[in-house]
Amino acid sequence: MQRRQQRRPLDSVLDERLAHKSAAGLRRTLLDVQPAEPGRVLLEGRSFLDFASNDYLGLGHRPDPGGDPGSARASRLVTGNLPVHRRAERAFAEWVGLESALLFTSGYAANVGTVAGLMGRGDVVFSDELNHASLIDGSRLSRARIEIVPHRDLDALRRGLETCDAERVLVITESIFSMEGTHADLAALRDLTTAHGAWLMVDEAHSLGTMGPEGRGSCVAAGVRPDILVGTLGKAMGSAGAFVAGSSTLREALIHDARSFVFSTGIAPAVAAGLPARIDWLRQADEARALQAAHCRRLSDGLRALGVEVRGSGPILGAIYGSPEVAVEAERRLAAAGILARAIRPPTVPRGTSRLRIVPSAAHSRQDIEAFLEALA
Ligand SMILES: *Cc1c(COP(=O)(O)O)cnc(C)c1O
C-alpha cells in the first residue's frame, strides 16, 4: 500500500526519461524531409544529395499510381519523416480525441514496440488472457512481470492491483476481443487503473471505425481516456499500418524507445497519404455501421435459434462449438454453400472453445446473412 502513493503518471515517468536522454546528448528529433528527385531529398526547402536512406535502386521515389512515393526509404529518425506522416498522425489524434499520435507499419509492430519500449524489468503488466499475440510478445520482450488476468475479470484485476507492489504498472486490454467479439468494460478499467495509479493501454483494432460516434472507437463511445490507445489500419480502415495515440510526451517517448519505430522503415508515403481520406470515409459511414450491426444481430439470433452458443455482440461473433471437429464441420458446411468462415481452434483459443469466427460486413446483403444461417441449419 505504501508503494501506491509513489506511483506516478505515465507522462511524469516519461518526461524524466527524456530529460536523461537530453542530458546525455541522446535526444533525437524527426527531420521533416520532402521527397525530391531520385538520390536527393529536400530539407527545409534545400535540396540534399541523399546518402542516408536505403533506396538502393531508386525505386522508392517512383510514385504509385496515386502520385505519392512508394517508400519512406529509411527510418523516420533518419530521413524517412514526411509531411504525409504528420498529416495522418494529426488526423488520427483528432479523430480519437487524444493529443498526439505516432504511426507504425503494423499493429503488431505498434504493440510490440510500445509495450516493450515503455515497460522494463521490475515493472508489472496485467494482461487479459485473450489479448492479441502482439501484446503478449511486447510484454515478454519488455522483461516486466506479466500477470495474466482471466478474461474480463475485473475482480481478479482488482485483487491483483491491490497486492501489486511495483512502481510502474500497465493494464492492457483490447476494446473488442478479436476471437470472440466480447467487449471490455473500459469505464470500469479506467476507474480501477486510476484508483491504483496504473496506466491503461487499449487496443482498438476492432472498434475503430466500427464503434462510437463517427466510428471513433470504444474509448470515445465510453467517454474513457486511456493513457495509450492503439488503432490498427488494416481492418475497418481498409489500409495498412497502425497508430499509437496519447499525450505528446508518449509520442516523444515512443520515437526514442519503440524499437519497431526506430529500427524500421517509415510507413509508405503512398499509404500514409490515403489515410486522412479514409478517416473521413469512416466518419461518414453510419449507414454501413448500422447495417453491419444489424447483420450481427440477425446472425446471433439465428445461431442461437439453432442452439449454438454465441459470444460477442459485433462487429465480430464467435459461434462456440467446443470441439475442434464440430467447428471444422461447421466450416465445411458453410464452404459447401460457398461461404467462408474459419474454424478457430487451440492454441489460438482455449481448449474446449473451438469456434467459428464470424465477421459479417456491410458489403453483405441481408440475403447473404440468411444464406449463412441456412447453410448451418
Ligand atoms: C489484427 C490485430 C493486431 C495486429 O494488427 P496488424 O496491423 O494486422 O499487424 C493487433 N491487435 C489486435 C487486437 C488485432 O486484432
Image (cartoon, rainbow, N blue to C red):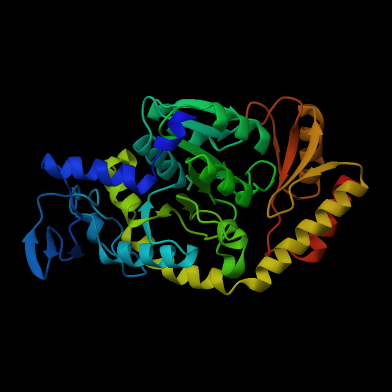
Closer to the camera in the image, 286 or 187: 187
Where does the image place residue 1, in percent across and percent down from the top left?
50, 30
Determine whether 102 is above or below 97 in the image: above
Where does the image place residue 283, in percent across and percent down from the top left?
55, 71
Query: Along the horizontal axis of the image, is 38 left or right of 293?
Result: left
Q: Report how many numbered discs are placed on residues in the image.
A: 0
Closer to the camera in the image, 375 or 155: 155
Closer to the camera in the image, 254 or 234: 254
Say whether residue 210 is visible.
no
Which residue is painted at 25% across and 56% down in the image? Answer: 60
Which residue is painted at 43% across and 37% down in the image? Answer: 5
Figure quadrant of residue 315? bottom right
Where does the image place residue 228, in percent across and percent down from the top left?
45, 49
Determine whether 277 is above or below 107 in the image: below
Figure quadrant of residue 58? bottom left
Say whether residue 89 is visible.
yes
Where does the image place residue 331, in percent across and percent down from the top left?
76, 40
Determine whether 288 is above or below 113 in the image: below
Determine whether 86 is above or below 226 in the image: below
Which residue is painted at 43% across and 67% down in the image? Answer: 94
Query: Along the horizontal axis of the image, is 244 left or right of 177?
Result: left
